[in-house]
Amino acid sequence: MNGNRRLLKLSAVVVTTLTITSCSTKDGSYFNILQLPGAILDSVFDNNSCHIKKEKVEAYTKQHYNLLRDEIKAKKGKHIEELMKLAEIKESEYSKMLTQLNKDYKTIFHNRQRVTEKLVQNMSRIYEVKEKTKKINGFSYSQISEITQKYVDTNFEKIRLAIKSSKSEIFVPLAEQLNIKDTTKQKSFINSLREKHFELYDDLLVVAVMMEGM
């Protein structure tokens, strides 16, 4: 099952969960999991206990991301058990939860589309679309997406580690491929994902766990 289908599957789980949980939405409506997860959990739930729980899950995920990733892949480990405990998941549900997280492993931990879209958005912000040609710095939107996707696919883990370490040199070759020659614009582009590790990586795990714990 590809990443998009897994996200849609997760979205269905979200809708089901919302119908039976005390964490109700502010306007009584459902939401789309394809939106930014952090923004969803911060703005949709009007329940203080949910926010407190989310803060604990976030903090633990940030601290133990690599170990959690490894343990979810192995479907066992003390860190993922502690995370489920923080999310107030019943111990009797641990095995079922781990199995589901393992099935969604690629979507949660290798979501290349998420990183690609963020980079393409940043490219669109630093260059205006030409009215006549509809191009951005000489490229069509689809060309930018294709070039960026290929680069992210090839360097996904290197990109993640660079973002985690607040380093931006990994994006210089991509900036060159996209013909970003202006020094100021290139600096803006290659630094655009610094400090974004939680938003691009950790947050997907937080959402998956929180949905099961509500």
Image (cartoon, helix red, strand yellow):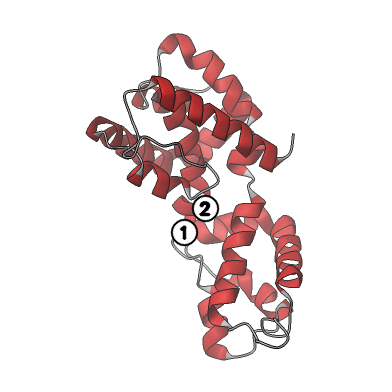
Pick the residue in front: 71 or 21. 21
- Residue 51 located left or right of residue 125: left
CB within 8 Å, label 2 to label 1: yes
Residue 165 numbered mark, or none:
none
Crowd rating for badge 2 (residues with CA inside 10 Å; few <14, some 14–19, many 20+): many
**What's the residue type where badge 1 is placed?**
Lys
In the current view of this chain or complex, which residue is farthest to the front? 28
Considering depth in this image, is 21 or 95 the residue closer to the camera?
Answer: 21
At 54% across and 27% down in the image, what residue appears?
13
- Check the image and report above or below for 171 versus 203: below
Label 1: which secondary element: loop
User: The disc labelled 2 sits on which kind of residue?
Assistant: Leu
Q: Residue at x 52, y 88 (%)?
A: 184
At mark 2, the secondary structure is helix
Q: On the image, numbered disc 2 is attached to which residue?
A: 200
Q: Residue 196, which numbered label?
A: 1
Please give the name of the residue rendered at 60% of the width and 57% of the height, measured from the top-left corner.
Answer: 115
At a point 37% along the width and 41% down the height, the residue shown is 58
Disc 2 to disc 1, C-alpha distance: 6 Å
Crowding near pointer 1: few (<14 within 10 Å), some, many (20+)?
some
Query: Which quadrant of the figure contains the N terminus?
Result: top right
Residue 3 lies in quadrant: top right
Snapshot quadrant of residue 169:
bottom right
The x and y percentages for residue 122 are: 55, 71
Above or below, comparing residue 210 to residue 75 in the picture: below
